[in-house]
Amino acid sequence: SKVAGKNRYTVYTNELNQKRHRRMGLEKDLEAAIELEQFFVVYQPKWDSVRGGLQGMEALIRWEHPDFGVVSPGEFIPIAEETGVIVPMTEWLMAEVACQTKKWAALGFPPFPVSVNMSAVLFTNGQVADMVERCLMESGMVPSLLELEITETVAMSDLDSAVVQLNRIKALGVCVSLDDFGTGYSSLGALDEMPIDTVKIDQIFIRKYTQPSKQAMISSIIAIAQHLGLQVVAEGVETEEQVRFLKSHGCKVMQGYYFGKPMRAVDCTAWLRQLPER
Ligand code: C2E
Ligand code: CA
Ligand code: CA
Ligand code: CA
């Protein structure tokens, strides 16, 4: 009826307004979030399934908003990119990771690399290598313990410039992973041209690994990586069946809820403590 239709419309506009209100709120509050110490880092293990041990951790950012609660990076990273907050935010994150790495070393854990996601927009102003270098210098972090995760979008606007910056970063001793491989604008060309160490197979392939087309993609990505001398990490591994499948296709390193969810530093330390010593 006409009334029901009008109600639906009202509900719809209310939802739209709420979304817009939230987005505006987030945008307004994002800049002050560093100063107000509302960001925190969670760490997710990467597991060496052949050796049976920790290979490294990935640092993922979270924002504890006073009204909205914990906001996921999927929601606020795009805002940070648009507003430029991504620069100080990433600098804060790298400093935090450097600090946490030292704490784990002081607690006697064997060293492991921690990776940081580097937004593609950081590559467009040509200052990302300076940023990484400054972070290493100021924190005294061992460069081989820092890794960067980038997506192929860094190569989209200017491949040559991206390659120059990545080579500078690699010369510092920092390893680089290509994240979300196989999705979006991924191209084999970028894989070949960019100086990377590791390819991360996107979780979409792992989630639907029983589909023949996904299996073809997974085994092909692993084969290409091996031919190019690159490491492979499978993301979003949740089940033992996925582990078995990936292992049988020669994938060594895996990451996902099966091995560990992203954890706050304190929980991550407890998780590290319960690992069998080797
Ligand atoms: P990503 O780099 O691909 O990170 C993996 C995402 O998958 C994370 O979501 C993680 O929590 C989730 N995940 C890990 N294992 C599993 C699993 O087994 N199953 C499922 N269903 N999900 C899993 P999160 O933390 O919400 O991050 C989303 C995206 O936000 C990241 O995708 C990354 O692109 C971006 N991001 C996160 N932190 C940062 C950051 O510090 N800087 C930048 N630039 N981007 C970040
Ligand atoms: Ca990542
Ligand atoms: Ca990913
Ligand atoms: Ca992703």
Image: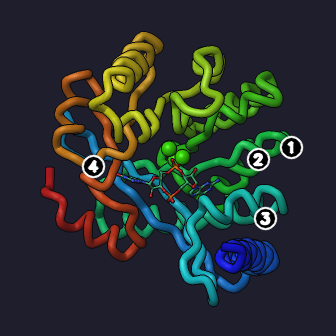
Pinpoint residue 54: horizontal percent, then vertical percent: 28, 49
Relative to 86, say whether 171 is above or below: above
One can see residue 30 in this view: no
Earlier sequence position, callout 3 versus callout 2: 3
Relative to 21, say whether 257 is above or below: above
Q: Which residue is at a point 26% across and 63% down the rendered structure image?
A: 272
**What secondary structure is found at the residue carrying circle 3?**
loop
Relative to 233, say whether 12 is above or below: below
* Badge 2 amino acid: Leu
Pinpoint residue 170: horizontal percent, then vertical percent: 62, 33
Q: Is mark 2 within 8 Å of ligand 1?
A: yes
Q: Is mark 4 within 8 Å of ligand 1?
A: yes
**What secondary structure is found at the residue carrying circle 1?**
loop
The reply to whether the C-beta atoms of the residues labelled 1 and 2 are less than 8 Å apart is yes
The reply to whether the C-beta atoms of the residues labelled 3 and 1 are less than 8 Å apart is no
Task: State the residue position of label 1.
Answer: 125
Around disc 3, counting alpha carbons within 10 Å, would you say few (fewer than 14), some (14 to 19), or many (20 or more)? some
* Badge 3 amino acid: Val
Residue situated furthest front in the rendering: 1
In whole angstroms, how far apart are the C-alphas of marks 4 and 3?
33 Å
Task: State the residue position of label 4.
Answer: 238
Q: Which residue is at a point 76% across and 62% down the rendered structure image?
A: 79
| Disc marking residue 185 | none
Task: State the residue position of label 2.
Answer: 122
In whole angstroms, how far apart are the C-alphas of marks 4 and 2?
31 Å
**What secondary structure is found at the residue carrying circle 2?**
helix
Earlier sequence position, callout 4 versus callout 2: 2
Asked which colour scheme the image uses, the reply is rainbow
Tag in front: 1 or 4: 4
Task: State the residue position of label 3.
Answer: 85
